[in-house]
Amino acid sequence: MRMLHKGRQSEKSLFFKYYKWVLWFSFTLYFLTSFFITNKPLPLSKTRVSGSKSSLASRVLFESVNKTRHKSKPKNPAAFKDLKIFVYELPSEYNEDWLSNKRCSNHLFASEVAIHRALMNTYDLRTFDPYEADFFFVPVYVSCNFSTVNGFPAIGHARSLISSAIQLISSNYPFWNRTQGSDHIFVASHDYGACFHAMEDRAIDDGIPDFMKNSIILQTFGVNYKHPCQDVEHVVIPPYIPPESVRNTLEKAPLTGKRDIMVFFRGKMEVHPKNVSGKFYGKKVRTEIWRRYNGDRRFYLQRQRFAGYQSEIVRSVFCLCPLGWAPWSPRLVESVALGCVPVIIADGIQLPFPSAVKWSEISLTVAERDVGKLGRILEHVAKTNLSTIQKNLWDPAVSKALLFNAHMQEGDATWQVLGSLYKKLDRSYKRSRVSSQ
């Protein structure tokens, strides 16, 4: 009997040891699986070229994400209430490869790179699980194909490149097809947005491609009247100015320092406005400025390029921001960031982030037909309410709202974009399903 009792005790002991081992193994497997599911993005493995070497440009964009993956993550801003964005991991020919040219991430159209970079670094807003996403960001860089003739971005390939990306994601994921792309986001930081042409008449003729008409476009082009190139759900964003260049300029000349130039403009001003294409550049506004005010001691007008032109802006009281081929101009952002009162000469322009930037309080708007009155208008402002305008303009929050940072900061341009997207949550497939249940 004693032997039988001992045998039963040993069987129980063996059973409990085996049970504990199975339990420990199950929990370990569960936690490991959970970690990899929540921390690893879903790559388009079918489209990746196996064995391809990652480029230096790729590391420049994405190393900062990997280095900080295990650091404490910034909290999801309460203002966005758990907004989630999934960033597609596309093959490098759609984005990373273009970064081999340093201009790609620094020129006036580079918001397509800057927004992608900021979203990659915005950990709590970015989700690696597409099923919990409100929006889907499609990172395609179409502004980095610089012409070998004049150095300007050539965007003739934009439609085919974006179409190819859509074909790729719609073939590998179910998310595009379930909404026809209505919760998908693209950047079109060109003269006439997703019409992808610098000349307005050609842009209108081409129109927005059908495959983008259901999506959300982040675009620099915007007007306050009906226009075919904004006949799509869109958010008007500022052109890209490197924040480092602004900081470097202000380190040498403070915002509130001496301003010995009354009216400043440096840029293209054709003496004969009808250029080789047969079009009138900037509706002849810049030519009229040159004809009327070249030689006027109040106006510092320069037609040649100068790499250090920001040092001139920070010395100026008023900075002219006339239209070019399109209404918007990078001078809008540079003027604000460097404390020079923008003088906007572009009828009907829609300016970015009006809830954050009170444009009427920090700038002047002059009708194109009134260019001949510029001298009198600016003299009057200088004698009356200039100090009030400058006080509003020099508020740090104003310039911050127009600058993109690699790591999003509260109130910066990426923050403003996300705030605008939050107002479009009715396009979120995930939230519409929850509300209908």
Image (cartoon, rainbow, N blue to C red):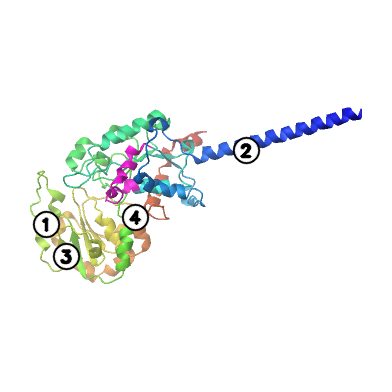
Q: Are marks 4 and 2 in contact (CB under 8 Å)?
A: no
Secondary structure beneath dot 4 equals: loop
Quick check: 207 left or right of 290?
A: right
Task: State the separation of the CA atoms marked 3 and 2.
Answer: 71 Å
Residue position marked by numbered label 4 in the rendering = 403
Query: Considering depth in this image, is 32 or 289 the residue closer to the camera?
Result: 32
Q: Residue at x 29, y 65 (%)?
A: 389
First reached walking from the N terminus: tag 4 or tag 1: 1
| Residue 312 spot, x, y in % from top left | 22, 64
Q: Residue at x 19, y 63 (%)?
A: 264
Q: Residue furthest left?
A: 272
Task: State the separation of the CA atoms marked 3 and 1.
Answer: 15 Å
First reached walking from the N terminus: tag 3 or tag 1: 1
Q: Quadrant of residue 394?
A: bottom left
Mark 3 closeness class: few <14, some 14–19, many ≥20 residues within 10 Å: some
Residue position marked by numbered label 1 in the rendering = 288
The residue segment tinted magenta is: 90-113
Magenta includes 95? yes
Q: Main secondary structure of the magenta part?
A: helix
First reached walking from the N terminus: tag 4 or tag 2: 2
Q: Which of the labelled discs sits on residue 28, or is there none? A: 2
Residue position marked by numbered label 3 in the rendering = 300
First reached walking from the N terminus: tag 3 or tag 2: 2
